[in-house]
Amino acid sequence: MSRRAIVVLSLLAVLAMAAGVAAGIVFAHRGAKPVAAEQPVTPPAATVPDSTAPATSTSTTTGPSTSSSTPAALTLRARVAQRLEDGLLVRWDASEPVDAVLSWGFGTPAGHQLQLPGGADHGTAKLSLPKTTQSVTYQVVGRTADGRSAGSAPASGRRLVRRVTLRVASLTLDITGGTGGVSTSFLGTTYTFGPGLAGPTAAAQPYAFPAKPLTIGTDSAPLALQFFHKPPSSPLRTGQTSVGVDFPEPGRTITLRRDASAVGVTAHLQLRVTVTIS
């Protein structure tokens, strides 16, 4: 055999031996007990909560919880609760407690102030008005503890004023000789009859004094009389006196009879007295 043929045969023999060894290894693996494969992991069963346990809830907040609401608007009202002879009694009401001031004046609610009790939502206050019969304008202004403020609508009022009207329903004079006369004066107004009225009697027509406002608390006033008498062949003489005029309750009229005399003349009067309020 040639040398080349020998080399080829040797290579074929080596290759055949290598193939047999590889096949044996494969068969050995097939007959061996297989190695345990990695078992898959089974997740644990979910835990069922105990239905008898008390229920609880939790919440997670990412910041402070706040509740914002706009406070209700503050409102105030004021009105005259009572008119008095010396002033006004003002009633005020607020929608919540306030510190308040009552302001008043003539024409506008300014010029005078009255501090009201603090921390209240209602009350009364007296405006003292003893020297005026004019109407005044008033307003209540209040402020809450948190700084909100409001005022009532301006309103007007006038103190109670009593007025008296005196009517002379009858006036006759008894004159002792000669002639006479009389002047009657009431609350600043005077009416005169004579002198020179011939006796023995003389009479005046009914007349009335104008209505006059009364001073606070007064319940009577004098009717002043000045008499004139001129006896025959004598100079004129004068004398003064007065009679009381009582005032009824407002809305009523009373009749009074009064007699008065001086210097030889006597007056007989029938008076009607009426008091009104405004």
Image: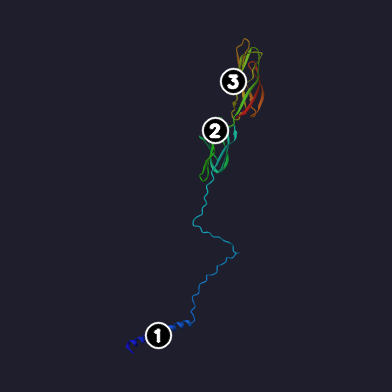
Where is residue 248 shown, x and y percent of the image? 65, 28
The residue type indicated by label 2 comes to Val
Q: Secondary structure at mark 2?
A: strand
Looking at the rendered image, the disc whose residue lies closer to the viewer, 2 or 1, is: 1
Q: What residue does disc 3 label?
A: 190
Q: Are marks 2 and 1 in contact (CB under 8 Å)?
A: no
In the rendered image, the quadrant that contains the C terminus is top right
Residue appearing at x 59%, y 20% in the figure: 190
Residue appearing at x 41%, y 83% in the figure: 19
Sequence order check, earlier mark of 3 and 2: 2
Looking at the rendered image, the disc whose residue lies closer to the viewer, 3 or 1, is: 1
Q: What residue does disc 1 label?
A: 16
The residue type indicated by label 1 comes to Ala
Q: Secondary structure at mark 3?
A: strand
Find residue 128 and report its image quarter: top right
Residue at the front extreme, as displayed: 1
Q: Secondary structure at mark 1?
A: helix
Between 120 and 69, the residue placed more toward the observer is 69
Between 231 and 207, the residue placed more toward the observer is 207
Which label belongs to residue 51? Answer: none
- How far is disc 3 from disc 1 in space, using C-alphas? 170 Å
Where is residue 259 shown, x and y percent of the image? 66, 20
Looking at the rendered image, the disc whose residue lies closer to the viewer, 3 or 2, is: 2
Q: Are marks 3 and 1 in contact (CB under 8 Å)?
A: no
Sequence order check, earlier mark of 2 and 1: 1
Category of crowding for the residue at label 3, using alpha-carbon neighbours closer than 10 angstroms: few (below 14), some (14–19), many (at least 20): few
Q: What residue does disc 2 label?
A: 136
Where is residue 179 shown, x and y percent of the image? 63, 13
In the rendered view, tell whether residue 250 sits above or below residue 40: above
Sequence order check, earlier mark of 3 and 1: 1
In the rendered view, tell whether residue 263 sits above or below residue 255: above
Category of crowding for the residue at label 2, using alpha-carbon neighbours closer than 10 angstroms: few (below 14), some (14–19), many (at least 20): many
